[in-house]
Amino acid sequence: MTPMLDHTHDPELRSWVQDANGPSDFPIQNLPLGIFRPPNERPQSGIAIGDHILSLKALAERGGLDEEASMACRAAAGETLNQLLSLGTPYRIALRRAASAFLAQGAREHHELLYPAVACELMLPVNVGDYTDFYAGIAHAENVGKLFRPESPLLPNYKWVPIGYHGRSSSVRVSGHPVRRPSGQRRLAEETVPTFGPTRSLDFELELGIWIGPGNQPGEPIPIEDAAKSIAGYCLLNDWSARDIQSWEYQPLGPFLAKSFHTTVSGWIVTPEALAPFRQRQPLRPASDPQPLSYLYSDADQTTGALNIELDVFLATALMRDRRLAPHRLTRSSAEYLFWTPAQLVAHHASNGCNLVAGDLLGTGTISAPTPDGFGSLLEGTKGGLEDIALPSGEARRFLQDGDEVIFRARAARDGYVPIGFGECRACITSAES
Ligand code: MN
């Protein structure tokens, strides 16, 4: 089930696109897929390479591609990548090999087919069908659980069943779109009745996003052994959360308006092929933990189904930007703190016959490390909004204020391979009246 390593992962491989050869999120070993809008043109599909974007349309016209790579380019000819994602692994691999050969040092240089990324607008890469958010970050579940139940932070089902809820796809937006502070019903501890108004406790949640493709037919579950083949790629995901609205509304049915106002994703789809060198063993469960039920268990998935991805959260306040202070790193976490592998999330989601569709989005749940320098939300870092987090500007935060900008970045690295990144998942908070 592990995508094969091939010459496209060779650490010696370099590109004639020079800015891809230094430290970059997008070296020739990455080749993530996206939709971009060049100045004064319609959006089109492309592959990030260094500080540039290779147009897939141009690649198809000039590249001398094999049949599968040509078909992948044709599927990506519109303004979304849903159709390409629906083709599945062999076509994605063919496209990756074609783009790698086209961009490799020594190949004929086609600088006229590249767009400078800075001049282009990165769009949402797919028309998001459905969006489901899980709760697979076990340190986050424990940290949040402790705030409410210090003696038994995890509910009894946590280690048996991947917990999730259905989110809202219409408000998934790509990195860069401002987040307007939502209003809703909230009740302070000392109040007897709720009031309606702007949230006083706006928070971020550091997550990985999983793009589905191809998916499954209704009534046909995805066996755990095949589940990785239904993952077309990954992104960074910020599940913005209004904690005061959430704590009032969530019982008994779970998150609703506290989260549905906005979800931010990074624009580039980092493929499972690009991440193949960074797969690793799912951490072994202590003997006292239940083992996964058989529909969630495969030796191959346990051996290679987890991802070695380092995840960072930065905060820049309006004052920090005015003073030209660099964004402050709040958090460094890692995908190793996911209790379930991506394949387990997919297999579980489809286990009741629910059909997943190319372009569906799964969130992993907040990925916190166990220690405060790795908490994936402010809720954890401020102990439920009771303690300040100090910033280099002399300011302090419990929750996000208007003008604050939150930036996620991520990196996959392993000795013997060229590290790859995800690009940014960023957004600035604007006032409820904006
Ligand atoms: Mn979440």
Image: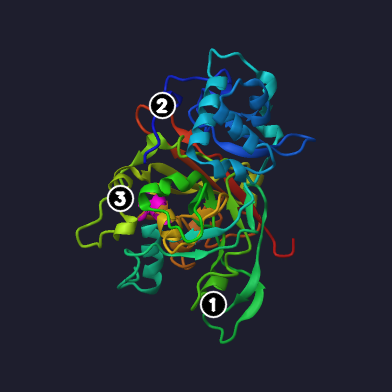
Decide: few, some or many residues near mark 3? Use Cα within 10 Å; few <14, some 14-19, many ≥20: some
In this rendering, would 35 be left or right of 236? right
Q: Please, is residue 197 above or below residue 297 in the view?
A: below
What amino acid type is highlighted by mark number 1? Trp
Decide: few, some or many residues near mark 2? Use Cα within 10 Å; few <14, some 14-19, many ≥20: few
Task: Determine whether the beta carbon of the residue marked 2 sits less than 8 angstroms from the nearest atom of ligand 1.
Answer: no
Residue situated in front as seen by the camera: 111 or 382: 111
Corner quadrant of residue 151: bottom left
Q: Secondary structure at mark 3?
A: loop
Q: Secondary structure at mark 1?
A: helix
Q: Position of residue 265 (x, y in %)?
A: 58, 49
- Mark nearest the camera among 1 and 3 is 3
Q: Please, is residue 94 above or below residue 141 in the view?
A: above
From the image, tell me which residue sits under label 2: 6
In this rendering, would 195 be left or right of 142? right
Residue situated in front as seen by the camera: 405 or 351: 351
Q: CA distance from mark 3 to mark 2?
A: 24 Å
Magenta part of the chain:
336-345
Q: CA distance from mark 1 to mark 3?
A: 40 Å
Q: Position of residue 392 (x, y in %)?
A: 53, 48
Q: Position of residue 405 (x, y in %)?
A: 61, 51
- Dominant SS of magenta comes to helix
Residue at left offset 49%, top offset 32%: 93
Q: Please, is residue 104 above or below residue 355 in the view?
A: above
What amino acid type is highlighted by mark number 3? Ser
From the image, tell me which residue sits under label 1: 248
What is the residue that sits farthest to the bottom in this orientation? 192
Can see residue 375? no
Q: CA distance from mark 2 to mark 1?
A: 52 Å
In this rendering, would 39 be left or right of 261? right
Pointer 1 with pointer 3, Cβ within 8 A: no
What is the residue that sits farthest to the right in this orientation? 40
